[in-house]
Amino acid sequence: MAKFEIVMPKMGEGIIEAAITKWLKREGDLLEEDDALVEIATDKVDSEIPSPTAGKLTQILFEEGAVVPVETVIAIVETEGEDVPEPVSDESNVPDKPEEDKETSAGKENARKLSENHRFYSPLVRSMARNENISPAELDNIPGTGKNGRVTKRDVLAYLENRKGTTANRSRKISADVPETTEKEEKVISSLPSVNTDSGDQVVEMDRMRRLIADHMIQSKRISAHVTSFIDVDVTSIVTWRNKVKNGFLQRNGEKITFTPVFIDAVAKALHEFPQINASVDGYKVIYRKNINIGMATALPNGNLIVPVIKNVNEKSLLGIVKAVNSLAQKARQNALVPDEIQGGTFTVTNFGSFDSLTGTPIINQPQVAILGVGAIRKKPVVLETSQGDVIAIRHIMILSLAYDHRIVDGALGGLFLKRLKEILENWDVNTEI
């Protein structure tokens, strides 16, 4: 029998880990190719992962609720066939390898031996052991405080502190170099001030998605230098046009037409003229995106948010955008989005007006550099300039708020983008056909 490793798949740009929410198969179960194996979740989407091969599920390496880095082995399946034996060579007849090659070979050999031990070690622990030259025999003797006696990162760090010749500074360096996994939430919680509770207070744990959203928002504020600019827009022409076409559109297409597709269409036009806003930052490098993929923040029935993405908006007709918006919104509410539908965004639109809010200061959806907030449309008295002089008229006014990353988007650029977006919306043709 051969062993096949099931790994946590990549779930999109910027996603480095996912939570295992439910195993659909148990150890010992027989699998067919494409059988539903496990349900996983990120801060953006829940997904069902199929088995890429037929065989017998012999090992489940992470429990439900575990947060696992992408490309980490999460299960072992035994398949038909035999393991390919490693080639055996007579090292006495092989010329000496360069020191660098010896180190590389030693690392690979150490990793192979570690994986052959009867005791299970996570990829994180194995990586630490290789980096610190902990032999398999040493690792076997480290007491494990994890479930079923498994060795955790904390156990390895404690061992390194106690090992002769290992200093606290060295342990801290290892802690910084190794990616955080299950300890991440503990570190976040320990860094927060304690909050007192009073009699009658109700304490409720955040659900998995709310925790991930919270971490994502804090990370964005730490990464980007947020600045928000505002502008008001007269959308009377758009309101008039929608009132004129909405009933006929519903009869012809069996679905409603909202303001959101109009705003997304206008944003795509403005981004085409201001490609500096359709960008990402990678260290000191700026990535100007070729495609205009606009995410639309969507509220879920449980109060959480998800951001499905409309790809290549500038290449779609208004009808195509309407259908994409309606389809993605419905899928989001039904928890039926697939990973491809929530990744690859280059700019995001969030609609505060859905809840009658005038405006807001949205947080950038990393790794993008800007996000547009759309406020509620309200009737207001406005001064209009006419050939006969200024008059006061009732108009439909909306406030737009643009939050942008001041590392690469200056106030002038952000202001010009907003101004152009205002012009596009205010000059909407009431005779537009759809």
Image (tube, rainbow, N blue to C red):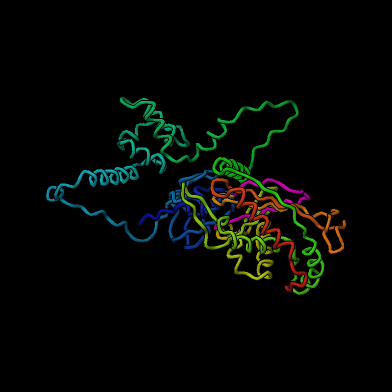
Give whichever of 324, 35 is nearer the camera: 324
Q: Nearer the viewer, residue 92 or 190?
A: 190
Residue 13 lies, with reference to residue 195, above or below; the image says below
* Residue at horizontal 81 percent and vertical 69 percent from the top: 244
Residue at x-position 55% and y-position 35%: 188
Task: Return the x and y of residue 272 as percentages of the image width and height.
Answer: 59, 63
Q: Is residue 238 left or right of residue 12?
A: right
| Magenta-colored stretch includes residue 348 | yes
The residue at the point 58 percent across, 55 percent down is 277
Say which quarter of the image contains residue 47.
Answer: bottom right
**Outermost residue toward the front?**
388
Identify which residue, 28 or 252, lies in the foreground: 252
Q: Residue furthest left?
A: 93
Q: Is residue 125 above or below residue 427?
A: above
Residue 266, x across and y down, in percent = 67, 62
Question: In the rendered structure, which segment of residues is drawn in magenta?
Answer: 344-364
**The N terminus sits in image quarter:** bottom left
Q: Is residue 217 magenta?
A: no
Q: Measured from the top left, where is residue 331 in percent x and y?
A: 65, 60
Q: Quadrant of residue 165?
A: top left
Q: Is residue 320 left or right of residue 426?
A: left
Quadrant where the C terminus sits is bottom right
Is 202 placed left or right of 221 in the picture? right
Label count reads 0
Task: State the residue in front, 365 or 186.
Answer: 365
Residue 337 quadrant? bottom right
